[in-house]
């Protein structure tokens, strides 16, 4: 049986949470298809994700919200209820590096990402042909010190116009303002190489080559006002050795970045990532 609804929640840990939620689902004829939970002993917080199927006669999302609301109130839950087939409306932002964008577009077209892509935004026109090949509108918003405020105002308009749920910075080489980062908290995913903070600035892979690194990697994280310091969703590494050139490191790093970002986007779109302060709980 296929799940119809996804419930995610976090609350102070105490006995009876799972039993109370399961009892409501049972009383209304739901069938639990997937259930994952985690109790963080460090802060006493309980996290859970349940995917369940509706009874044969059907039960609307608002009916489920009404049925679960008393339990949520009793346990002080921060909770969310979503139709499982609702696709996450995603805005991809890029600059001139196309590897992450190309990978996401292929996965989207093949149906492996539960997202809709109504528009792609860039501060450069370079990747418009790639977007056009997939039939996705491409809007260029140039950004400079003088135009940054106007550019972010236009970005806010696009987010509202297209009812965007998630922004993906697929090697978008501009820093979002503190205000925008705060307003979109938990809704913006960034990808960067895992050399930070050792190799900042231009050509990090060439810097790493100069130091003879044995690993290259990538980190996908939520964006906060602290650059590259947001809650981490996913990371991965690739072993390298002395035979590899700087260009080989770049290719290995780009492949790793693409994989890590795709996993982070998929997990977010499937409501598998819950914020836990400066950390995340990922029910993969």
Image: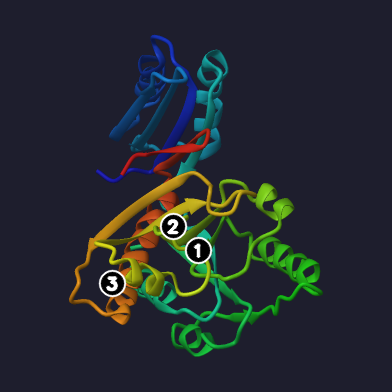
Is the residue 69 above or below the residue 56 in the image?
above
- Horizontal side of residue 110 vs 127, given as left or right: left
Asked whether residue 60 appears in the rendered view, the answer is no
Q: Earlier in the sequence, mark 3 or mark 2?
A: 2
Number of other residues with Cα within 10 Å of mark 1, as a class: few under 14, some 14 to 19, many 20 or more: few
Q: Earlier in the sequence, mark 1 or mark 3?
A: 1
Residue occupied by mark 1:
200
Q: Nearer the viewer, residue 218 or 163?
A: 218
Tell me the CA gap for discs 3 and 2. 18 Å
Give residue 251's position: percent from left, percent from top.
31, 77
Number of other residues with Cα within 10 Å of mark 3, as a class: few under 14, some 14 to 19, many 20 or more: many
Q: Nearer the viewer, residue 217 or 85?
A: 217
- Furthest residue to the top? 15
Tell me the CA gap for discs 1 and 3. 18 Å
Tell me the CA gap for discs 2 and 1. 6 Å
Looking at the rendered structure, the secondary structure element under dot 3 is: helix
- In front: label 3 or label 2: 2
Residue occupied by mark 3:
252
Looking at the rendered structure, the secondary structure element under dot 1 is: loop
Residue occupied by mark 2:
198
The residue lying at 28 percent from left, 72 percent from top is 252
């Amino acid at each position: 049986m296929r799940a119809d609804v996804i419930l995610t929640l976090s609350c102070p840990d105490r006995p009876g949470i799972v039993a109370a939620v399961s009892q409501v689902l049972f009383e209304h004829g739901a069938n639990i298809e997937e259930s994952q939970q985690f109790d963080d002993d460090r802060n006493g917080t309980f996290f859970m994700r349940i995917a369940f199927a509706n009874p044969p006669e059907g039960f609307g999302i608002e009916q489920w919200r009404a049925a679960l609301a008393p339990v949520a109130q009793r346990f002080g839950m921060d909770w969310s209820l979503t139709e499982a087939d609702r696709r996450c409306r995603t805005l991809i932002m890029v600059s001139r590096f196309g590897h992450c964008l190309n990978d996401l577009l292929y996965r989207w077209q093949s149906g492996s990402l539960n997202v809709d892509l109504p528009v792609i935004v860039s501060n450069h026109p370079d990747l418009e042909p790639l977007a056009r090949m997939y039939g996705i509108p491409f809007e260029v918003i140039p950004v400079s010190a003088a135009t940054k405020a106007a550019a972010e105002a236009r970005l806010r308009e696009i987010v509202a116009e297209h009812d965007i749920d998630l922004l993906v910075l697929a090697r978008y080489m501009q820093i979002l303002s503190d205000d925008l980062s705060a307003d979109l908290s938990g809704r913006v995913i960034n990808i960067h190489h895992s050399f930070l903070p050792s190799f900042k600035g231009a050509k990090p892979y060439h810097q790493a080559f100069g130091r003879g690194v044995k690993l290259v990697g990538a980190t996908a994280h939520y964006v906060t006002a602290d650059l590259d310091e947001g809650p981490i969703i996913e990371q991965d590494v690739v072993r390298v050795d002395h035979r590899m050139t700087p260009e080989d490191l770049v290719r290995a790093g780009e492949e790793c970045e693409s994989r890590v970002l795709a996993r982070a986007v998929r997990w977010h779109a499937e409501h598998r990532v819950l914020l836990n302060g400066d950390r995340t709980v990922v029910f993969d």
